[in-house]
Amino acid sequence: VQLVESGGGLVQAGGSLRLSCVASGFTFDDYTIGWFRQAPGKEREGISCISRSDGSTHYADSVKGRFTISSDNAKNTVYLQMNSLKPEDTAVYYCAGFIATPIGLRDFTNGIDYWGKGTLVTVSS
């Protein structure tokens, strides 16, 4: 299994970015793809996930209402649309895979099977 992120970069506060994660190598349909982020000096934080089997989504409170996760199953790609970005959103964003459909975000964050290498998002004030 391989997860490849793209779309990171530098943006001003209040701006938007869209991250992409292309997944390959999954041999079954019951899996979930989501996003973590890790800011300098902080722990990695799970922020959102989407299930391939039923399209259910989950968000952390820190991004709810600003970030939207979506998927294009034909392209095996998951997107994270990030709007109203704040300097505190600055982090390395990682795509992650979980072989199941989680009950909630905590279920996803505690059960990661695969990781991408990350893409840096920097939000300037």
Image: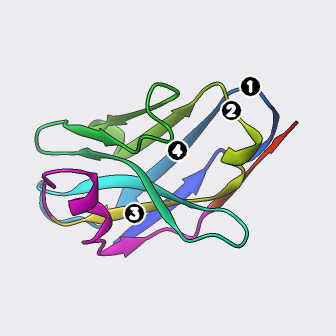
Per the model, the C-alpha gap separating discs 1 and 3 is 24 Å
Q: Quadrant of the N terminus?
A: bottom left
Per the model, the C-alpha gap separating discs 2 and 3 is 21 Å
Q: Which residue is mark 1?
A: 15
Q: Tag 2, which secondary structure?
A: loop
Other-residue count near label 2 (Cα within 10 Å), few / some / many at <14 / 14–19 / ≥20: many
Instruction: Write the start and end of the magenta stretch as one range.
Output: 100-118
Q: Earlier in the sequence, mark 1 or mark 2?
A: 1
Identified by mark 4, the residue type is Ser
| Residues at circles 1 and 2 in contact by the CB criterion of under 8 Å | yes
Per the model, the C-alpha gap separating discs 1 and 2 is 6 Å
| Residues at circles 4 and 1 in contact by the CB criterion of under 8 Å | no
Q: Which residue is mark 4?
A: 20
Indicate whether residue 114 is drawn in magenta.
Answer: yes
Identified by mark 3, the residue type is Ala
Q: Which residue is mark 2?
A: 85
Q: Nearer the viewer, mark 4 or mark 2?
A: 2
